Image (cartoon, helix red, strand yellow):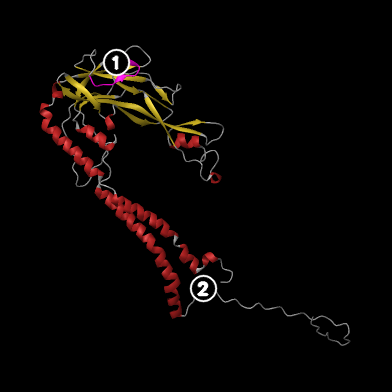
Amino acid sequence: MANEPIYNSRKFRAFGSYIFLLFGAGILAVGLWTLSLPDTRTAAISAYNQAIESWQSNVSTNPLLNAAFGVRAKWEYEDRDINRPLALDTSNINDKLDDSPRSGEVIETYQHIKFAIHNTSDDLFSSREFLLPPRVWFPDNYCVSFHPNGDTSTALPGQPLCPFDQSMSGVYVSQYTNYTIKIDCQLKLKKRKPDVKNNCAVKCEQEENGFWEARGSSVRAGTCWKYRVLSGVCAAVEKTENGFTVTRGCYANGGFAMYRNVDANKFYSLANVHMEVRDQADPFLVAADSTLNTFNFGASRHQRLIVGVVLSCLGGLMCVLPFILTWWLLIRLPQIEAANGTKSLYDEEEELPVKKPKPKPIPNPKYKGGDYELIEN
């Protein structure tokens, strides 16, 4: 129609649908990228299963079966050990992989040989609770030393030197670690309530369970801190001519310590830190290295295939939809209307000529008759 907005026109609706083409191309690209990813899960599980086969073939003659280990800890701020050393017991608790079963896949299990204590109580670390974030911005640091056969005077060789006591060998661990994360609280500020949505402190503490360190008076100036508390210390050993030697840590990239993510503004303690000694050929080390301590081998090839095909089909459909809609509105629909002699709601009507109003008669003072004379200007 003559005064109809342009967004109600047939052409506008046809070409406006091409916005689906942009979204469709993006979804299609993600689907194809998912299908092209390498199958890292199969390789990781294969390496893990091979390590188990090698382990099971030698487990009956493993020297750890006749060994005994202990552990002690020294606090950085006191010139003495914390309480008494602890003996590590043979543990039969299976390691739990954070990995749901996959169809058609078999993850082997094996006979464990490890020495562990899962509740350090007050015997190894300081028993006092600490608040995160702490009132003092320095964590307690410890030097954890593993020793053989309950002999606390002789540390297992291969352990690094304590940074605060060069006369002692052991693993240097902290009570907790912290790191920063980015907070998205600066977008669409005009549409957000000033005291909630665009307040970085609220988003950091309520949504991320972190601690907001403000800088200045602005609600968006500062740093969001997250925390990890010590959860385990593990050393891998190897049998040599002179006894056992520490070769590496049990965790990813040879790390000795494991930390778990925790929420800020709560109290924690080191009462349940796992202390372990394992063989360097233990398949647990292979799983830790390949999964970076998550112990999840990732999505299977079948799962990635399903996700990739679904995204590719959806993206392809969204890419084709604008062309179909354009063909229907601009080509096929006019043909149907012409054949049926009908008009579309989108057709514009012809403009009618504007009729001028008839002039009104005005009196002529020169005319003496009874009627008025019409004088046109």
Q: Residue at x 41, y 60 (%)?
A: 21
Q: Which mark is residue 20?
A: none
* Residue 121 vertical position relative to residue 344 in the rendered view, above or below: above
Which tag is nearer the camera, tag 1 or tag 2?
A: 1
- Considering depth in this image, is 313 or 169 the residue closer to the camera? 169
Q: Dot 1 surroundings within 10 Å: few (below 14), some, or many (20 or more)?
A: some
Helix, strand or loop at label 2? It is: loop
Quadrant that contains the C terminus: bottom right
Residue 186 in sight here: yes
Residue stretch in magenta: 157-166
Front residue (pair 240, 125): 240
Q: Residue at x 28, y 49 (%)?
A: 304
Residue 26 locus on image (x, y percent): 39, 54
Q: Is residue 254 left or right of residue 345?
A: left
Residue that badge 1 annotates? 168
Q: Amino acid at mark 1?
A: Met
- From the image, tell me which residue sits under label 2: 347
Image height check: is 311 above or below 276?
below
Q: Quadrant of the N terminus?
A: bottom right
Observer able to see residue 108? no
Q: Residue at x 25, y 27 (%)?
A: 248
- Tell me, yes or no, whether the two marked residues, 1 and 2, touch with CB atoms within 8 Å: no
Determine whether, in the image, residue 350 is placed left or right of residue 274: right
Residue 36, x across and y down, in percent: 29, 51
Between discs 1 and 2, the one toward the N terminus = 1
Q: As shown in the figure, which amino acid type bears the numbered disc 2?
A: Asp
Residue 264 colored magenta? no
How many badges with numbers are in the image?
Answer: 2
- Write down the quadrant of residue 373 in the picture: bottom right
Query: Residue 141's spot in the image, x, y percent?
Result: 36, 20
